[in-house]
Amino acid sequence: MNSYKINKKLNSRNKKLANTRKKFFQPSSGLLRAYTIIFFIYIFVPIILIFIFAFNKGEGYNFPLQGFTWDWFKDFFKDRIALNAIKNSIIIAVISATISTILGTGLTIGLVKPIFKFKTAFIIALLLPVLMPSLTIGISALVFFRSINIPLGIPIVILAHVPISLSYVFLIMMGRIEGLDFDIQEASIDLGATWFESIKDTILPVIFPAIIAGWLFSFMISWNEFIVTYFLIGTDITLPIYIFSQLRFGISPKVNVISVFVTMFTLFVIVLIIASNKIYSNIKNKY
């Protein structure tokens, strides 16, 4: 009887402690709502201001605004250096993203299947570019290519961007492939399909959304990369390098225009990723 009373007292005390913890440590819905609003204001207000000042007649960043204008956009499209920088950035990003996606997909399939003895060592090696600072990668690449007398420029930048993007593609693909049952592929081989046909018909349709996401993600990584590009670009120029050169002499209104285009392009990429996943889901449900 005494033990029953003791247990009852302990249970009631534990309930009181739990209620006290909830009061002190569990935030109210109003607090969470306020935190969410402040967070989104902190994230999106600077972007909105960039859009506003991109269309402002004045060159400064002061209120009140001096009127609406398209002049900064016209000046931007007349700037051949800026347009050349965008072209170079697109070339570098497209090529490096394509190479990274192809290599990353093959490496992920190979590492998930038990054909490597030192699987953990390979995974660590593939993740090193994610963990290493960009400064270290840029200096190492510069020393390496200088030591073998290869001139700096766009091809060297692409070669340096591939291992960086490859790591992110590998991480995305691992999340998709790790739970995949490869017995289906082996069964298709037993039924007469070649190895490439089995991969094409059983594995690629399942990992296709991850391939698209990996390509787009590696494209954005290469598009925005500054430090490694700065060491290896030589006399060429990319968009991040152009923006940096503009900011050295004060914030130019053309930087606002570039920010508007980059933001719109980023939103387009996000919509494309969501749309590709929905299209894939619809096709999968039909068949």
Image (cartoon, rainbow, N blue to C red):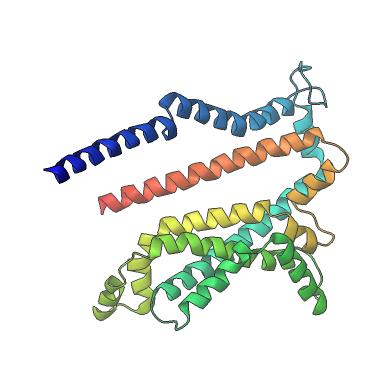
Position above or below: 187 against 67 = below
Residue 233 location, x and y as percent? 79, 61
Residue 125 location, x and y as percent? 57, 73
Residue 92 location, x and y as percent? 68, 59
Residue most extreme to the left: 1
Quadrant in the picture for the C terminus: bottom left
Image point 53% across, 57% down: which residue?
215
Of residues 197 and 159, the one drawn nearer to the viewer in this rendering:
159
Position above or below: 80 against 233 = above
Position above or below: 243 against 179 = above
Residue most extreme to the bottom: 117
* Numbered-mark total: 0
The quarter of the picture where residue 265 lies is: top right
Residue 42 location, x and y as percent? 61, 31
Of residues 261 and 140, the one drawn nearer to the viewer in this rendering:
140
Of residues 108 and 276, the one drawn nearer to the viewer in this rendering:
108
Is residue 37 visible to us here?
Answer: yes
Image point 44% across, 23% down: which residue?
30
Task: Name the side, left or right, on which 229 lies relative to 94.
Answer: right
Residue most extreme to the right: 249
Is residue 149 visible to us here?
Answer: no
Image point 55% across, 31% down: which residue?
40
Quadrant in the picture for the N terminus: top left
Image point 42% across, 27% down: which residue?
28
The quarter of the picture where residue 195 lies is: bottom left
